[in-house]
Image (cartoon, rainbow, N blue to C red):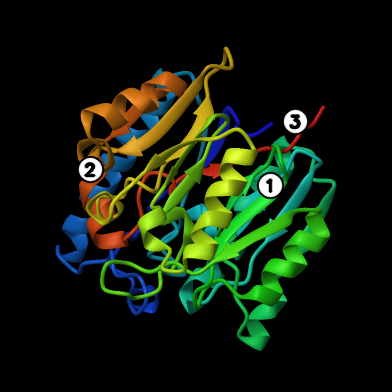
Amino acid sequence: MQTTNTVLMIRPARFAFNPDTALNNRFQQALLDPDRAQQKALEEFDDYVETLRQHGVEVLVVQDTPAPHTPDSIFPNNWWSSHADGSLVLYPMEGQNRRLERSKGVLKVLEERFAVRQTIDLSPLEQQSMYLEGTGSMVLDRQHRISYACHSGRTHTQALRLFAEQLDYRLCVFHAVDRHQAPIYHSNVMMSVGRGLSVVCLQALPDADERRALELSLRDTGKDILALDFDQLEGFAGNMLEVHDKQGQPLLVMSRSAWRSLSGQQRRQVEQHSHPVVVNIDHIERIGGGSARCMLAEVHLPVRH
């Protein structure tokens, strides 16, 4: 199934601007003093969790620990992904302090509640300076087993191939740049794929053949395309995630800045496919450089009986 009703979120202990990732994440801005950043992040995080639960989404919350300091732990979707066949995949991370997140008890929480039938550990690729940062690097069409990914310093072709071979996915790989012609660091800031709707910034693909191939792949798999411009990309409108409520009804989760960036016609297009769930995470976006989708690690594993 393309979407899930269960997500895991990490409640931050020391949320902060992360210099380890700022080099190629142009969304990050160093703004508030550390105490204020952490307090605002906690407020936004708790409200986000409550909003999801009110909409019938099951949210597992894991409290982060102050040490070792992992300022980006609030974005757990980058270092692991889970799959309906019971596979759990661990990913090679570029940022040194992001690698520390693997040892902070999250996997134990998953293994206690869900049936993990195999663990595919790609993290040793870090020793070869090859990276693939989970469902940040890849936007997965789970139903049609397609991994959409843009080349970047955090998304390496060899790592993508290993993922595709191990999980029987095919790849749709392309180059994508922001309005300043800098490579987009994570695919999930420029596109999302739901059951019937794909939100994508086609404008970010400079190569016309790659742009056509991406569009064709989405249309061939029955996706209605909502095309973003660069202003909307910078408003985090690419960083959405479709989940579903307990009745199976689709919900499209996004930040307030993302929703505000959409035109009236685009909002109606969203509403034709899903119920929009809009959360205020302004401070997390500015300091962390990630948005609503980055904060949600989807749990597709079978429940342990």
Q: Residue at x 40, y 73 (%)?
A: 183
Is 148 located above or below residue 241 in the figure?
Answer: below
**Crowding near pointer 1: few (<14 within 10 Å), some, many (20+)?**
many
Q: Quadrant of the N terminus?
A: top right
Give how far across and how far down residue 300 sits, in percent.
Answer: 68, 37
Q: Residue at x 41, y 27 (%)?
A: 52
Q: Residue 81 placed where, x, y %? A: 64, 51
Badge 2 marks a residue whose secondary structure is: helix
Q: Please, is residue 214 above or below residue 162 in the view?
A: above
Q: Nearer the viewer, mark 2 or mark 3?
A: 2
| Label located before the other in sequence (1 or 3) | 1
- Whole-angstrom CA distance, mark 2 to mark 3, is 35 Å
**Type of amino acid at the residue the image marks with label 2:** Ser
Between 212 and 274, the one lying in front of the other is 212
Q: Is residue 123 something that shows in the picture?
A: no
User: Between tags 2 and 1, which lies in front?
Assistant: 2
* Element class at badge 3: loop
Q: Residue at x 35, y 50 (%)?
A: 291
Using residue 123 as the reference point, say whether residue 28 is left or right of it: left
For residue 257, the mark is 2
> Which of pointers 2 and 3 lies earlier in the amino acid sequence?
2
Q: In the picture, which quadrant includes the C terminus?
A: top right
Residue 98 in sight from this viewpoint = yes
Residue underneath mark 1:
82
Farthest-out residue, top: 247
User: Which quadrant of the view contains residue 70?
Assistant: bottom left
Q: Which amino acid type corresponds to the residue marked 3 in the rendered image? A: Val
Q: Is residue 128 above or below residue 94?
A: below
Secondary structure type for disc 1: strand
Can you tell which mark lies on residue 290? none
In percent of width and height, residue 150 lies at 52, 65
